[in-house]
Amino acid sequence: MIRADSLSVVKGRRSLLESASMVLRSGEKLAILGANGAGKSTLLSCLCGENSDYGGEVWLGADNLADLLPGQRAQRIAVMPQQVELAFPFRVWQVVAMGRSPWGDEQQTLDWQQDVMKATEVHHLRNRLYPQLSGGEKQRVQLARVLLQLWHYQYPSAGQQAYLLLDECTSALDPAHQHAVMHQVAAMVGPNIGALAVMHDVALAASWADRVMLLRDGRVMASGDASLLCDAEALAACYDMSLALSRQYARVNQQWLEGR
Ligand SMILES: Nc1ncnc2c1ncn2[C@@H]1O[C@H](COP(=O)(O)OP(=O)(O)OP(=O)(O)O)[C@@H](O)[C@H]1O
């Protein structure tokens, strides 16, 4: 599991995260939601070790994350940040293959690279230049890279647990691709893999997540199973929106939950 105990992040005089605690276990799909600036990406940056300037502790299984080298972390945590800029004209297949760089087995995993490109619907783009792709195509390529990083954990022989941390990984995707991509992430989740996704689309979260955490002003406002997304008062408080509006979201979310 990944466990965060009382995480706090302060920048200057601003508190970005205040005593936030959470757990992500293998086999789980956790959605983190909250208004712009609530602290979701800040939390993710602590969980993956990109930001080590925090109070509290992050545990990866029995290991304190702070004690692991970047290469060790990359073999157990794959992160998809909100923005990935690549100016160099790599081909799509080369970007995807970078997912194996923590393992150094790019040449031995060509079959997995084909499989992940098919699963994320970028196989037909494999020889295109990455900088020339559309925003949504780039996002699917990045997701393919991140999934490939942990691809072998789907197999029982992996023997360890690993975690996907996805920060708005569907923000540029059309509705069909949003659901296809989250379905693929769900398909990878199992005995060795857990997934955490920061999301703004509450309906997509209701269609995907087992558990939900709502962040507000750097604090964990509420957490529970996916039915939390049908709680109009919680949604109104989380997003500072009217009850009339949040009731509409809650109704739609209820339908997504019932349709699962
Ligand atoms: N290095 C920094 N210095 C000062 N403030 C920062 C820094 N990084 C982030 N912040 C602020 O911290 C707050 C939380 O940022 P964060 O990126 O975690 O929000 P978020 O919940 O991911 O938002 P969004 O939904 O808009 O992506 C924001 O108000 C942001 O402006």
Image: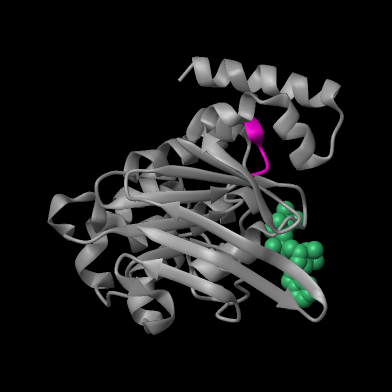
Q: Residue at x 42, y 56 (%)?
A: 164
Looking at the image, is 18 positioned above or below residue 211? below
Q: Quadrant for residue 230, please give it.
A: top right
Residue 76 in view, yes or no = yes
Q: Residue furthest toward the left?
A: 157
Residue 225 is situated, as x and y percent measured from the top left of the image, at 50, 33
| Quarter of the image with the C terminus in it | top left
Q: Is residue 164 left or right of residue 197?
A: left
Q: Ligand 1 is in which quadrant of the figure?
A: bottom right
Assign the magenta stretch its main secondary structure: loop
Q: Within the image, what quadrant is residue 132 found in?
A: bottom right
Residue drawn at (23%, 63%), measured in percent from left and top?
Answer: 109
From what the image shows, is residue 185 above or below residue 126? above
Point out residue 7 in the picture as x, y percentages from the top left corner. 58, 67
Part of the protein shown in magenta: 199-203
Q: Quadrant of the N terminus?
A: bottom left
Residue drawn at 38 percent across, 72 percent down: 74
